[in-house]
Image: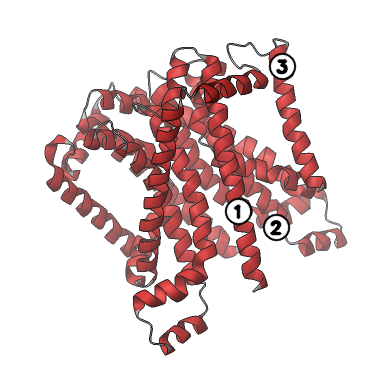
């Protein structure tokens, strides 16, 4: 059922794209078929792959930092109720600010290059991951914890049999949201302060008015983001269904 | 109360620490200027009216994006809620929507619409509209069946039932969508201005950065952060009141 709906949706989106193309013409758009061909030849180009690798590397580091730091902030805040209540509105405020305005600050601190991109990807991902982790720990059923105490579970057993199974579904949701935001952060970082990577290519194509290139890159990014999100979403739903 | 006090102390402490680190040169002034200098610079900029036009432009664009997202989002949400087959088909889109890096479409929008206000508004709208749709659906799903039956007994048509019964019941949830729409519109519009545009707060920050004009850059960053945080905080407080009233009723 779900697969059929996804299939219909993809067909609808492609049809919409094609219709839009027929309406505005070659001045501003290319057809889906032409874009797939362009993307294929781009992927075959040896000069293109280093850019993909650069973005992948920056994103992987930024995302990894976001997960580790996000959990390190969120888990203790979830365990300590008072600290959590103090910090929550601050985290929510950090989540809702346009973080792109902080980009010059990151560039002034790290300089142009890889570290700035990694840092920018990381700060986008840290906040949602810590908010979800905090709520995951906070919402653990207190009866389970009392039961654990009554059974005199060791700390290790407590973590293994209660904390991880109870908190994992929400933490995975947070990681899924953090994944998307860290990707956006990395790409934004590349758009301004970088000479390499997919974000840089996108900016370059924009200033050269290279529509084929813009569409091929956008398609690549959308397919990548949507694909990974679908996998994480499937994992997320399975964990939530079991809990 | 204790929580509020601790939070205030934490924020004041963080700002004071930054001030001290900057004043004593631990953080060099060409990286970060002291918060007091940021505030001073912001005050003189606001008093001189130098950026009034940019601020007005950004706020207008954000306002248009929010308004469009609310109208389209509530309409689409209401439509989809009463059409389950379409809703099921679009469900994967809802789940993936925010995973897609929306700024990747900005170059495309620039190519299609040119360097006016429209591409920025469009990015703000695209980011905001899905939050409104999702929260409208969420609110409409919670309307108790007895209210729908009452509407049928009074022979309300589809549109008047939506306007008089279903949407008023869903109002607090739609408000949550509105709150998110405000935050996302700011993120979208200011981010887009930052990438490429001809005016606006984001443009001025990026212009000041490129000219190593730290006082102006930090003043405008401070301005946008204070603006967005105070708007979001007031909406958050208002939302809490709305939801509390619904629970009492």
Mark 3 secondary-structure assignment? helix
* Residue located at (40% from left, 43% from top): B124
* Residue A119 seen in the figure: no
> Chain ID for label 2?
A
* Residue located at (61% from left, 55% from top): B238
| Residue nearest the observer in this picture, A230 or B114 | B114
Between the residue at mark 2 and the residue at mark 1, the CA separation in whole angstroms equals 10 Å
> Chain ID for label 3?
B
Q: Position of residue B149 (x, y in %)?
A: 46, 86
- State left or right for residue A185 relative to residue A82: left
Compared with A49, B103 (above or below) is below
Q: Position of residue A164 (x, y in %)?
A: 68, 52
* Residue B44 seen in the figure: yes
Label 2–label 1 contact, CB within 8 A: yes
Asked whether the residues under marks 1 and 3 belong to the same chain, the reply is: no
Task: Give the crowd class for mark 3: few <14, some 14-19, many >=20 residues within 10 Å.
Answer: some
Which residue bears the numbered disc 2? A139
> Chain ID for label 1?
A
Which residue bears the numbered disc 1? A170
Can you say which quadrant of the picture contains the N terminus of chain A? bottom left
Which residue bears the numbered disc 3? B21
């Amino acid at each position: 059922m779900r697969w059929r709906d996804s299939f219909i949706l993809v067909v609808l989106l492609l049809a919409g794209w094609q219709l839009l193309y027929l309406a505005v013409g070659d001045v501003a758009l290319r057809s889906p078929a032409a874009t797939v061909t362009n993307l294929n030849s781009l992927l075959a180009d040896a000069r293109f792959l280093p850019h993909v690798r650069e973005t992948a590397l920056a994103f992987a580091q930024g995302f990894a930092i976001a997960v580790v730091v996000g959990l390190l902030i969120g888990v203790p805040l979830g365990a300590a109720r008072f600290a959590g209540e103090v910090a929550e509105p601050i985290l929510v405020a950090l989540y809702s600010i346009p973080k792109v305005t902080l980009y010059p600050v990151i560039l002034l601190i790290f300089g142009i290059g890889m570290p700035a991109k990694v840092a920018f990807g990381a700060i986008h991902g840290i906040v949602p991951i810590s908010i979800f982790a905090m709520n995951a720990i906070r919402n653990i059923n207190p009866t389970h914890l009392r039961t654990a105490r009554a059974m005199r579970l060791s700390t290790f057993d407590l973590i293994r049999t209660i904390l991880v199974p109870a908190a994992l579904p929400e933490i995975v949701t947070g990681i899924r949201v953090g994944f998307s935001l860290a990707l956006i952060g990395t790409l934004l970082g590349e758009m301004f302060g970088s000479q390499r990577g997919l974000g840089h290519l996108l900016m370059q194509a924009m200033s050269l008015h290279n529509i084929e290139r813009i569409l091929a890159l956008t398609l690549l990014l959308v397919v990548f983001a949507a694909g990974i999100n679908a996998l994480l979403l499937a994992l997320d739903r399975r964990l939530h269904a079991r809990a | 109360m204790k929580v509020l006090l601790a939070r205030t102390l934490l924020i004041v402490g963080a700002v004071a620490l930054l001030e001290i680190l900057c004043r004593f040169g631990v953080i060099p002034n060409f990286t970060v200027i002291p918060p007091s200098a940021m505030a001073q610079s912001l005050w003189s900029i606001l008093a001189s009216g130098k950026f009034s036009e940019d601020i007005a432009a950004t706020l207008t664009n954000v306002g248009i994006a929010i308004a469009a997202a609310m109208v389209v989002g509530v309409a689409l949400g209401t439509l989809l809620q009463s059409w389950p087959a379409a809703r099921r088909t679009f469900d994967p889109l809802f789940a993936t929507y925010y995973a897609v890096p929306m700024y990747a479409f900005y170059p495309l929008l620039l190519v299609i619409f040119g360097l006016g206000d429209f591409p920025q508004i469009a990015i703000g709208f695209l980011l905001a509209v899905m939050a409104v749709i999702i929260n409208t659906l969420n609110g409409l799903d919670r309307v108790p069946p007895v209210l729908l039956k009452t509407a049928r007994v009074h022979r309300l048509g589809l549109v008047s039932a939506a306007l008089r019964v279903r949407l008023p019941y869903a109002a607090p949830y739609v408000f949550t969508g509105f709150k998110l729409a405000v935050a996302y519109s700011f993120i979208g519009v200011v981010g887009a201005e930052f990438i490429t545009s001809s005016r606006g707060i984001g443009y001025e920050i990026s212009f000041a950065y490129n000219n190593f004009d730290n006082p102006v850059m930090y003043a405008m960053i401070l301005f946008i952060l204070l603006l967005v945080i105070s708007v979001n905080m007031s909406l958050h407080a208002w939302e809490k009141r709305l939801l509390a009233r619904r629970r009492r009723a």
